[in-house]
Amino acid sequence: MAPESITAIVVVAVIVVTAVVLLADTTPGASVRNTSTPQLNTVVPWVAFIAAYVGFQLVAQLTTSLDGLGTRLLAPVWPALVVTGALVAEHLAERGRAARLAGWLIVAWLALIATSTAAELRTWSRDGRAYAQPRWRSSQLLRQVELLPPDALLVSDQPGAIVVFTDRRSAIEPPVSSPFGTTVPGPANRDRFVRSIACAPAGAYLVWFDDAPRELFTPEQIGRLVTTTEVASTSDGAIWRLDAPAQQTC
């Protein structure tokens, strides 16, 4: 399981534990000091925010899967978790034996952070990060891009890599379709896209890497709008020449 998925599960577990502690402490007949009541009332809004936000993200993950649930999407939760954890730990510390549980929760949280950080650092040192990865430095497709006309318009699922490694500033992304890559963009986006191809000074080329994001307009969908002719094929992708319909004007 990916480290970010584990982190997401741990966050949900922390919410559940916190909620259980609050319910146990506010149940009629529970042994709670009167001085603790304001503190618990302070915790409730934080827990409500965490539960609502993470619940929304889980529903979005199950229904659209537009982006993986991980530390980036859960970033707004971290400050709330720190405040909630501190308040709950302080409250538990007032209850004698429960102080030991608070200590173990803090130790487990710090261990999770240390383990996740160490795993990320090992991955970065081995595989590099972003465009520092070996796959980009050894890309055969990028070598083929350098052979194209210097003023050609390049349509690519990885325009950033083309700019970084070939110093071409004419690389653009194709239009975005649905999160599942099954529906075509609206007429306005399609017309704008075809017009940009028709008005390219030296023609347009589709530079497509094999690991394209699934939400982008695919080569098959592009082929329904313009004529495509394969120019090159490598182990990590392919290049097509794009010709706009003859009736298209700039």
Image (spheres, rainbow, N blue to C red):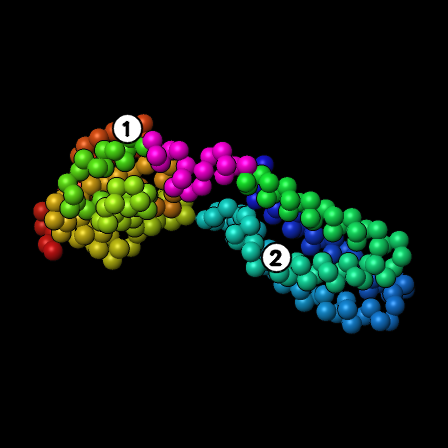
Amino acid marked by disc 1: Thr
Q: Nearer the viewer, residue 115 or 96?
A: 115
> Residue farthest to the top?
235
Can residue 139 be found in the magenta stretch? no
Specify the principal SS of the magenta part: helix
Q: How many marks?
A: 2
- Tell me what residue is drawn at x 32 percent, y 46 percent: 160
Residue 156 visible (yes or no): no
Magenta span covers which residues?
122-138
Quadrant of the snapshot with the C terminus? bottom left
Residue 116 located left or right of residue 148: right
In three-dimensional space, the C-alpha distance between marks 2 and 1, rounded to whole angstroms, equals 43 Å
Within 10 Å of disc 1 (Cα), the crowding (few <14, some 14-19, many 20+) is some
Residue at x-position 55% and y-position 48%: 70
Q: Could you say where residue 152 lies in the image, as x and y percent from the top left? A: 16, 45
| Kind of residue sitting beneath label 2 | Trp
Q: Position of residue 14 (x, y in %)?
A: 70, 52
Disc 1: which residue: 234
Q: Residue at x 29, y 55 (%)?
A: 186
Label 1 element class? strand
Q: Which mark is residue 78?
A: 2
| Residue closest to the eye, 125 or 241 | 125
Quadrant for the N terminus in the image: top right
Of residue 21 and residue 98, the one placed in the foreground of this image is: 98
Q: Quadrant of residue 142?
A: top left
Q: Residue at the location (79% across, 53% down)? A: 102
Q: Secondary structure at mark 2?
A: helix
Name the image quarter holding residue 20: bottom right
